Image (spheres, rainbow, N blue to C red):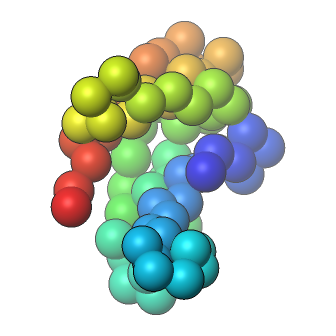
Amino acid sequence: MAGEWSNNLATISRDAFSGRLSQSATTSGCVSETGAGGCLDGNGLNGVYGVAIDPLGRFVYFASWSSNALLTFRRQG
């Protein structure tokens, strides 16, 4: 999930059985431009809005209009 105006990303896990979504309570649960709010510190997150997953499900891409950046994250699990 991307927060365009909060300049952060939240990592969400889905339980395969129940379909329930959850976010980790640790710093691995989010990444923010400044590391604020107990999140990991990241760059290029100002105005992040677009989210896409590659066809094989290995990577997640985020586009940022304000940072003029494309962020790439490798999916775990």
Relative to 62, say whether 40 is above or below.
Answer: below
Residue 64, by quadrant, is: top right
Q: Is residue 37 visible?
A: no
* Residue that appears at 66% across and 20% down: 66
* 74 or 8, nearer to the observer: 74
Residue at point 66%, 17% (across, down): 65
* Image quadrant where residue 24 sits: bottom left
The residue positioned farthest toward the front in the image shown: 17
Q: Is residue 44 visible?
A: yes
Q: Residue at x 39, y 35 (%)?
A: 60
Task: Name the image quarter holding residue 46.
Answer: top right
Residue at the location (37% across, 56% down)? 41
Q: Position of residue 67 (x, y in %)?
A: 56, 20
Q: Is residue 75 left or right of residue 55?
A: left
Looking at the rendered image, the quarter that the C terminus falls into is: bottom left
- Image coordinates of residue 50 in percent, x first then y, are 63, 26
Which is more toward the observer, 72 or 43?
72
Is residue 33 depicted above or below 41 in this figure?
A: above
